[in-house]
Amino acid sequence: MIKIGILGYGNLGRGVESAVTLSDDMEIAGVFTRREPETVETQTDVPVFKVDDLYDMKDEIDVLILCGGSANDLPTQTPEFAKYFNVIDSFDTHAKIPEHFENVNNACLEGEKIGIISVGWDPGLFSVNRLYAQAILPKGNDYTFWGKGVSQGHSDAVRRIDGVYDARQYTVPVESALESVRAGENPELTTRQKHTRECFVVAEEGADLAKIEEEIVTMPNYFDEYDTTVNFISQEELDAEHSGIPHGGIVLRSGSTGLNDENKHIIEYKLTLDSNPQFTSSVLIAYARAAYRLYQDGVVGCKTVFDIAPGLLHPETPEYQRKNLL
Amino acid sequence: MIKIGILGYGNLGRGVESAVTLSDDMEIAGVFTRREPETVETQTDVPVFKVDDLYDMKDEIDVLILCGGSANDLPTQTPEFAKYFNVIDSFDTHAKIPEHFENVNNACLEGEKIGIISVGWDPGLFSVNRLYAQAILPKGNDYTFWGKGVSQGHSDAVRRIDGVYDARQYTVPVESALESVRAGENPELTTRQKHTRECFVVAEEGADLAKIEEEIVTMPNYFDEYDTTVNFISQEELDAEHSGIPHGGIVLRSGSTGLNDENKHIIEYKLTLDSNPQFTSSVLIAYARAAYRLYQDGVVGCKTVFDIAPGLLHPETPEYQRKNLL
C-alpha cells in the first residue's frame, strides 16, 4: 500500500482524502494542518496531526500531497518538505513555474527525494495535451478555452467590492469561437472573443446596484477585457443554485500536414467537471502513484507531468495495460 | 539531426516522408522497398534502396520506421530489424500485441536497440487517453467511438463481392449515443447503437444491385451487427467525393468522485482527421524522436506509448516546455 500524507485540509485536501478511497493500492497516513488537530474532523476518520508532527513521521509516509495555495503556501512548503518526503503539488502560477521547479529540484536532490510539481488539469492534463498535440502537429495553432466553471479568484474580487455580500463568478467559453476553431478556421481570437464572464451577486441591503455593476464590469485585469453580465440574486438562490464548484475547459490544436498543407486535423481534449477540487485531487493521487514507483526505482529530483510516462499513473501492471488498454 | 529510415512506401511511408519536412530536427536517410528502387519515385527526392541494403546502412539510420501492414509485414519485420535498428511500428492487431511485444523485446535486447510498437492513434493516442482517464477516474465507464472515417478493411470486404467494381465504406458514430455519454448517463451500448456503416458502391454494368446490397448488410463480422446503408454511385462520383482517407473518433470516460459518487466528470478526447495515414505518420515520427533520445540515454528493449514520457516527443528542451507549455 502506498501511504499518502495530506498537508492542508481545505477543498483539495478533502478531495484527496475521498479520492484515495477509490484506489485499492493507497491509504492515508494522516492529515496535517496548521489548525488545532482536535478542531478538524475528517470525512473518513483519518487521523489529524499538526504540521510539525510531519518531521517525526518520515517513515510512515511514502508521498506527501501538498494541498495549500500557490500564492502563499506552496512556494515555501514544497521546497521545505521535498527535503524529507516525496512530494506532489498543484502549483499553478504559470509564470513562476521555472523558479519553483528550481527550488523544489534543489530540495529534492538534497533529500534524495522525488517531487512532481504543477499537477492538476491546468497546469497538468491540459499542459500534457498541449504538448502531445504540438509534438504531433508541429504546424498549427493552439487554443485553450476554460469553463463553464467557477473562478475562485474572480468570485473573490467581486466579493471585495463595497456593498457586495456574496458572489459567484463563472467563466464561459464563447460557443461561436469554439465552433470556428473546431471547423479548422484558425481564427485569431481576442480575450473578449474567447470567454464571457457571468456574475451572480448578493448585494447588501440598500446597496447601489448600478454602482456595483459598473465597478465589476470595469475592474482592470479581472473584467474590463471581457463581456460581463451581472445578476443580482438572493443569498438563498446563490446557496441553492451556485454552491457547486464545477469547472472544465477545452484544449484544441488545429494543424495541417502534407507537402502543401493539404490535410487539416483537429485534436480536442475536453473536461467537464462537477467538482474542480475533487477532480484535481484525483489527478494528484495518480501522480503520487507515479512518484512512488519512480522513487522505488531510485529516481530523484523535481519532475513535471511532462516527465511522467502515462503507464506509471495506472494501478495495473504494464502487462495488463498492454493487453487491455493499448 | 535524427536520421530516419522508412521501410515500405505506401500511404504511411509517404506520410512519414512528408511529416519529416515539418520537423527541423530530422532528415530522411532513405526509403527502403521490396519493389525495384528505380520504379519508386519519392515526393521529396529522398533516395530509394532495396530492403536488403538496410543491413549495410546501420550507421546511417538512427530510427527505422516500419510502414508495412499488421497482418503480413510487421509480425516478422519488426523483430527482424529491431536486432539492428531502433524501430517504430504501428502494429494494430490489438489481440496480438502481447505476443508482438515479446518478439520485439527479445530482438531489441539481443541487438541492444529500442523499439516502440503500436504507435499511431488507435492503438496509440487513444490508448494513452484511455489510460490517463482510467488512472484519474478509477470509478467510471470507457467509451470509444470511431469515425466518421473510412475503414479500409470494410471497403475491401465490399469490393470482394461479385458485381462490385469499387467501394468506399465509412464508419459513423451514432450522435444520440455520443450525446448520452457526454450527458453522463453511462449508457450500455450495443455494437449497433454505437456506430452505423455507410457504403458507397460502384457496381459493374448489369449487376444485381438488390443482391449486392443484401450481401453487404448481412455480411458476418463486417456488417451484420450494424445498421448499414448502401448507396450505388458512379466511379466518377466515387473519385470526386470519396477519394480522401479521413478518419478520427472519440475516447470518453464518464466517472464519478466523492464519498457518495456525488460528482460526475467527463473526459473527452476527439480527433478529426483529413488524412488517417498522414496523421498516423505524424505520430510515428514524434515517437521516433523519443526513441532516439531514450537510446542516447542507454535505454534498450521494447516500449509502447504507455512507457514514453510526453516531454520526449516534443522537439524543444524540458526548460522550454516547462516555461511555455506547462
Image (tube, coloured by chain):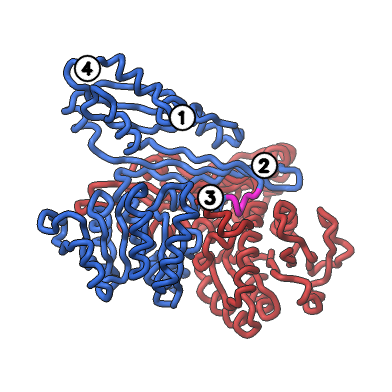
Chain colours: A blue, B red
Residue, disc 4? A207
Does the magenta stretch mainly form a helix, a strand or a loop? helix
Query: Who's the residue at 39% across and 77% down the image?
Result: A296
Q: Label 1: few (<14), some or many (≥20) within 10 Å?
A: some
Q: Chain of mark 4?
A: A
Pointer 1 residue: A174
**In the drawing, what numbered circle is on residue B242?**
2
Numbered range of the magenta stretch: A134-138
In this rendering, do the residues under marks 1 and 2 share a single chain?
A: no
Crowd rating for badge 4 (residues with CA inside 10 Å; few <14, some 14–19, many 20+)? few
Please report contact status of discs 2 and 4: CB closer than 8 Å, yes or no: no
Residues at circles 3 and 4 in contact by the CB criterion of under 8 Å: no
Residue B311 drawn at (x, y percent):
55, 60
Asked if residue A154 lies left or right of residue B223, the reply is left
Label 2 marks a residue whose chain is B
What amino acid is labelled 3 in the image? Leu
Q: Quadrant of residue A159?
A: top left
N-term-proximal mark, 1 vs 4: 1
- Identified by mark 4, the residue type is Ala
